Amino acid sequence: MKAVATLALLQLYISATADLVTAEVSGNVTIETALSASPGDIVVLPCYTAGKVTPLVTRWTKSGREIVTGGDPTRLFIVSPNGSLKINGTMPGDEGNYLCNSTLPDNSSFLARVLLEVTSGPENVSTSISPATALSNRTLFTYRGSSVTLRCSSSSYLSQHLTWAFRGDSSSNDSLVSGSGSSLEFTIQDIQPSAQGFYSCRAHNPVSNVTVDSSTELLVYYVSDRHPECKWTLTQNTSLVQFTCTWLEVYPTPKLRWDMGPFQVADSLNVTMSRSTLSDGQTVNCTARDQHLGPEKEKSCSFTLKLPFPEGEPLVSALEASNVTLTCTETTSKPPAITTWRKGVQQDYIESGSKYILSLEGPVFKLTIVNVTKEDEGFYFCHSENPLGLRELEVELTVKTASSAYTGVVIGIFIAALIVGSAVIIAKVVYNSRDRICLGGFGQVDDDGGDVLSLVESDDEQVFQDAVPRLPPITNGHHTTLVQIHRIPSSDQEDAETADTSPQQQEDTVQTEEPVELVEF
């Protein structure tokens, strides 16, 4: 880039008014002047400027060596009648101290010293930022978290001073780093969105006091780690719903799309749906995509629509003149349902007041009826509606008077007493007949006499040990139970046999009594 202050082919004629110092030393007048020029400039070095007198003789020397005028035709050094030295096409190397020695008509001498500085630049100022990608408008962008290096270079003669500066939303032309030399670098570690803005390389020539700036805009792109947010907004019309998809902390503005529409560039995308286009169990999805990333970087959010389903007790009873609370719980609806209480076949809307108290505890909707009367008896409806449809819970309220309640209590007490008394009587009968209870299925007693099966308890076992032979040991792994079978004659038969039998026969009968039958189980 060319220096703004380049004075190529510009003729300079500077009077000795700047940095002018005069002194009189042994009759000589000395003037000192400082000039600067760029390569290619035409420079005039002044000599005698004190009056209109033309010097008789003028000699110019540089660093003690006399300057030959009219030598190189491409670079002519010409001494004017007033003693000034004209240099055509200044070039690097012409800088230095020049001395003019003029002899005036009164034979006095005049000395003039000129300090010539040849400067160039800053020019060819170039900048680079990497890693970064250029957009069509030459703006650069990089991604959050990258390590970005800024480089600046420039050419300047004799010297230059380079500075990197930043101007962003939260700062104004802050200096980042500076130094002398032909180039300057600065690295930003883990770049963040706050570092987005304009970066300028400022090249300054301290000799010519010329400054050149080269500026580049750098954008910092970033994508949130979080997924977009899907939500809904209910409207006054319960059959309509507005779905909103939002993806924040993304730059540049992302592209959003609902399942039912095209991609749009927006931070937040809204769509309104009606009941006719929605169904229970339907999944609604929003897809978000960064403008400069491929489909593999897409993120999404979704939710599943559900009809309301109010739950509660369908039958409720209450005493007259008391308070009763009807409850309805609705937790499944998505979007959330609007739940109200209604009464009667006409489903009259119920509002809070002195008679009805409406309250909400989490998902539980409560209706409290104060001082219940027979007129409050009937059907109540828990009415839940969302954009998908309407569902109701029917609750039947029965109101009982105090007398009917007392009658029920008396009947209940009577039935309980009857059950307890019956149980006591049955238990007493069973207890009194405990000695006559035999094991069913093993024997029975009939009128003619029969076999009676009785189990020998442990207390009587010793009595029969001598008379009853012992059973063989266990052979099949099962225990053996000893059962005695006695034949008991009937009382009538026993009396007849006793009457017809002599004492001797009775004795023989006793002696010839059949042995006890043993049954093994």
Image (tube, rainbow, N blue to C red):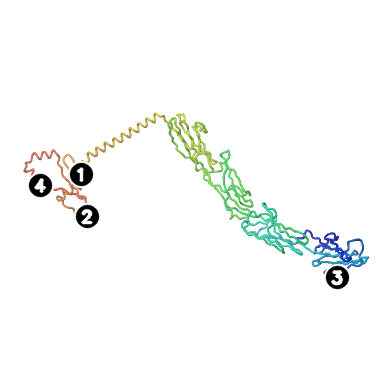
The residue beneath circle 2 is 474
Distance from Cα at disc 1 to Cα at disc 4: 24 Å
Earlier residue among tags 3 and 4: 3
- Of tags 2 and 4, the one toward the viewer is 2
Q: Is residue 237 above or below residue 225?
A: above
Q: Which amino acid does label 3 sit on?
A: Glu
- Of tags 3 and 4, the one toward the viewer is 3
Badges 3 and 2: C-beta atoms under 8 Å apart?
no
The residue beneath circle 1 is 443
Distance from Cα at disc 1 to Cα at disc 3: 164 Å
Q: How dense is the environment of label 1, judged by Cα within 10 Å: few (below 14), some, or many (20 and up)?
A: some
Distance from Cα at disc 1 to Cα at disc 2: 26 Å
Q: Which amino acid does label 1 sit on?
A: Gly
The residue beneath circle 3 is 66
Which of 176 and 83 lies nearest the eye of the viewer?
83
The residue beneath circle 4 is 512
Earlier residue among tags 1 and 3: 3
Distance from Cα at disc 3 to Cα at disc 2: 152 Å
Badges 1 and 3: C-beta atoms under 8 Å apart?
no
Q: Where is residue 43 in the image (x, y as percent from the top left)?
A: 84, 63
Badges 2 and 4: C-beta atoms under 8 Å apart?
no
Secondary structure of the residue carrying tag 2 is loop
Badges 3 and 4: C-beta atoms under 8 Å apart?
no
Residue 265: which disc?
none
